[in-house]
Image (tube, coloured by chain):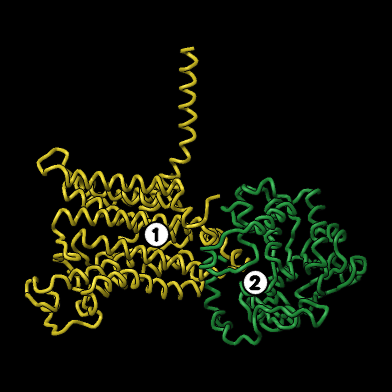
Amino acid sequence: MTALDSLRDTFRRDQVFDFMRQGTRAVAPGQLDASAGKHILYLEDITVSFDGFRALNDLTMYIRTGELRCIIGPNGAGKSTMMDVITGKTRPDSGTCFFGQTLDLTRMSDTEIAMAGIGRKFQKPTVFPEHTAFENLELAMNGPRGTWHSLFSRLSGAQKEWIEETLQTVGLLKDRYKVAGLLSHGQKQWLEIGMVLMQKPQLLLVDEPIAGMTRQEVERTGELLQSLAGKHSVVVVEHDMEFIRSIASTVTVLHQGSVLAEGTMDQVQNDPKVIEVYLGE
Amino acid sequence: MRDSTFKGALSDRTARTFIGVLFGATLLVTLFNQVFPPDSALHVSAYTVTLLGKYLCYALLALALDLVWGYCGILSLGHGAFFALGGYAMGMYLMRQIGDRGVYGNPELPDFMVFLNWSELPWYWQGFDQFWFAALMILLVPGLLAFVFGWLAFRSRVTGVYLSIITQALTYALMLAFFRNELGFGGNNGLTDFKDLLGFSLQSDATRVGLLIATAVALAGAFVLCRWITGSKLGRVVMAVRDAESRTRFVGYRTEHYKLWIFTLSAILAGLAGALYVPQVGIINPGEFSPLNSIELVVWVAVGGRATLYGAVIGAILVNYGKTVFTGVMPEAWLFALGGLFVAVTVFLPQGLVGLASQQWPKVKARLRQLTDKREGETA
């Protein structure tokens, strides 16, 4: 976020400072309770508007535990805004957003949400450019996040092994001591996925994972995402229809900030409303 | 990868070289001052000893700034304020040490208070007759100010140029406040006429040498401490905040806590530098809060090279040596030279002198090897 954005954010009259809201938290933080239902994420009637433009308009959507969900939609459909709402980057004007049964995401800070078990890979790959691939994963590794703890912490053998396993998974083992800023675009995407994995999240939000990847890399990404589903719940935002067809069981189409259609790829592609939106009248 | 324990920081090569050079220089100056008689050609004057001590104080201050600017990306344009506060805390102790040897001979009140017709010591001057209390305040006052200031600024996510501006405003506001007589810190004259520190006369050569050694030890200690911190996981998180703050938040770190931690520590180091500076130069006045000082400090670090620690130290010593020479030869041109230096470094040497050296070194080495190979070829 640029300084100008944060300044604007500070002076928004329709919002209270985040740190002042913490006292009003209704639920105990930290404990995810996904046991009661078969869903892990509940988005209900979410509305977000920027200067009168409704980026999300009464969006209602549920993500099942362990599923791999793909989200598609034309530009400006609200895909990234939805991710922002889930990860606490943007506050909805109205609506509820629950992670499991107990965690009200609209009342948690972005770091609290990350620690509760939601990992995010951004559209533009954002890694720590001056750190090596290994250090990137070390920083992302699940564990205590306090300042004093970090000062005295040392990697145990098991942690080192875990980092190397993840490097293997994302194909960066031989480049592990390379500074992340020097990796190729595709490798950065992989590294960021690796970082999200190190957080041991319950829910992974993956924004355009295959941009800038070669054919082979795309295939490997698809395999990786599929292997993650089951253990984790995965939400993928993508434009590449072929890629989505190859990995997804359920597809949600967003249009003008709300859900237009939901179902298998075939159902969605044959839906007249979807055809109208994508091909025009 | 470096060993990330404190012991590891002590034994790493950079720290050893740094401490070796620092102590070597200090020892040489001490020996030449103490062993050779004043009329000998090899004698180092007390003036030079104090000058070197002053440079080392500046180096410690630059080190503190490098920690927040180089490693955390917080460009503080008000670090001189913490330096001055540490200096004032030391100055208050030195004032109380004067006792009844002042011009007015009042055993309790410093001269300027007698002059202002004050009848008793203000509450915030209590306790400063004890060295341990003053020492505590030297660390506590700058640390506390930085903590409160940082708490407010970082929680509201004030970053970049806005943060630089409010740090500048902070030091400016403090300067205006300290200029006022009613505040009780001697107004625009500040605190001066110090007699002795812990019973040692500040005018004697031995005390000056002692202060130089104390400064060198403080600088070495601070260097090892910073080396340890920047090599730890905490250091890596802090650098991550510098490079990609929002990513760091989404990975789950409370970035404002990390910034606050490093900012507070840096302010404490700056305060320590100020406290060592005051007995060596013999005065502390509100001019130390001047925004210009803080900006000069930024130039030292930029010239030396950011995020290396030793770069900041080298920059501080070189620029201040340049200042000593320059202001002797043509004082009115110094500010232009300083400004020109800053522009030149920003445009041509973004990594500073240290960056230039590490960039050129492999080329020089390769060239040397070529030359020796050629010579060997000729002789063979």
**Residue annotated with mark 1:** B65
Chain painted yellow: B
Residue at the location (66% across, 78% down)?
A30
**Residue annotated with mark 2:** A115
* Residue A189 point in image, percent of width and height: 70, 55
Classify residue B85 by image quadrant: bottom left
Q: Callout 2 environment at 10 Å: few (<14), some (14 to 19), or many (20+)?
A: many
Position of the N terminus of chain A, as image quadrant, is: bottom right
* Residue at the left extreme, as displayed: B104
Residue at the location (62% across, 57% down)?
A136
Chain painted green: A
Q: Secondary structure at mark 2?
A: helix
* Residue A220 point in image, percent of width and height: 80, 53
Residue at the location (75% across, 83% down)?
A101
* Residue B370 point in image, percent of width and height: 49, 24
Position of the C terminus of chain A, as image quadrant, is: bottom right
Q: Amino acid at mark 2?
A: Met
What's the CA distance linking mark 2 and mark 1? 31 Å
Q: Callout 1 environment at 10 Å: few (<14), some (14 to 19), or many (20+)?
A: many
Give A120 or B188, whichever is nearer the viewer: A120
